[in-house]
Image (spheres, coloured by chain):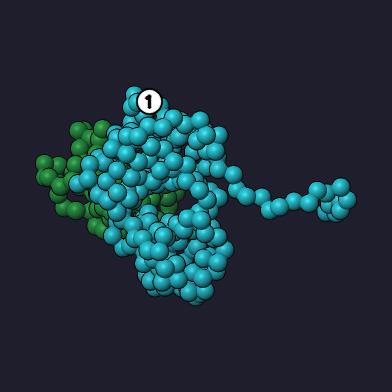
Amino acid sequence: MVESPSVNMPSTTPLAPASPLTALAAVSRAVASARLVALGPAARLVFRGREAAIGPAGEAFGVALPREACRFNAAGGRFAFWLGPDEWLLLAPGAEPAPLFAAIEAATTGLPHSLVDVSARSTGIEVAGEKAAFVLNQGNPLDLSLGAFPVGMCTRTIFHKAEIVLVRHAPDVFHIDVWRSFAPYVWELLEDARRELA
Amino acid sequence: MLIITCPWCGARPEVEFRYGGEAHIARPADPSALTDQEWADFLYNRTNPKGLHAERWRHIHGCGRYFNALRDTVSDFFVTTYKAGEARPDVDASSGGSK
Ligand SMILES: [Zn+2]
């Protein structure tokens, strides 16, 4: 391996992950009935594990992992989303992933599980307003009525051709978590869906 | 749109799922004891019924789990779905269950 040159290297600050939506969000129109917000960086961990590891993982993260299908728990600004019967997405907006990762690993040592830092894999979009469900339904086939998709529900699903995680925080507030490379595609189709709303 | 009931997530649209082939096909415990014909039957030959078919589906854009379904290959009607590892339910094509 060649030594990298030590001369002529500019002093650098650590690279911050850029949002794939910065440019699109900057020129986004304000639509009160269906607001779009590109959410900031967050720690994202995917935890999968057998029964014995599930409780300790939730304790270490600070949010109990929900056992009911398609539901999430929240505490202290952190979220544990049920993605499958042995699979959860742990989300901590604005947090560094490394300490969380270390804490959960320490709590689950010796217990069969997998923990993966996927913080840089996806990005978040908030869709909020009285027409939020209407806009989402332009590309998502789920029944988003409050009876079928209540507050507190989360699920992997699709938006047009992209896989997303869809979360309902309030009757009119949804979050999308989408892989970075799909984010501009989802964003622009959301923009298209709300064009008719002044 | 066809609605398929995931045993974990409930009724969901067809586009969230992928087909996974015929269900309840167990790999022979001792392949070397089989004749070529028996091995070929395990690998390639399927029942292909006209009527109720037990088959695997995966909720790939949902919980990610494989599960089994009884589907009528004539009408495309899903008579029921059940978790992987469970026995094939004893139902006929006219019974209710999940759609
Ligand atoms: Zn499912």
Q: Residue furthest right?
A: A7
**Residue at image location 71% in from the left, 52% down from the top:** A13
Is residue B8 placed above or below A160 in the rendered structure? below
- Chain B shade in the render: green
Is residue B77 placed above or below B28 in the rendered structure? above
Mark 1: which secondary structure? Answer: loop
Which amino acid, mark 1?
Arg
**Residue at image location 33% in from the left, 27% down from the top:** A197
- Chain A shade in the render: cyan
**Residue at image location 51% in from the left, 65% down from the top:** A100
Quadrant location of the N terminus of chain A in the rendered image: bottom right
Q: Which chain's residue wears label 1?
A: A
> Residue A154: x and y, percent?
33, 51
For the image shown, how many numbered marks are present on the structure? 1
> Residue A189: x and y, percent?
42, 30
Question: From the Cβ of disc 1, is ligand 1 less than 8 Å away?
Answer: no
Whether residue A92 appears in this view of the structure is yes
> Residue B93: x and y, percent?
14, 42
The front one of B48 and A34 is: A34
**Is A118 on the left or on the right of B42, as rendered?**
right
Examine the image and state in which quarter residue A186 appears.
Answer: top left
Q: Which residue is mark 1?
A: A195
Quadrant location of the C terminus of chain A in the rendered image: top left
> Residue B1: x and y, percent?
26, 32
Q: Residue furthest top?
A: A196
Whether residue B32 appears in this view of the structure is no
The front one of B3 and A171 is: A171
**Is A112 on the left or on the right of B15, as rendered?**
right
**Residue at image location 29% in from the left, 49% down from the top:** A170
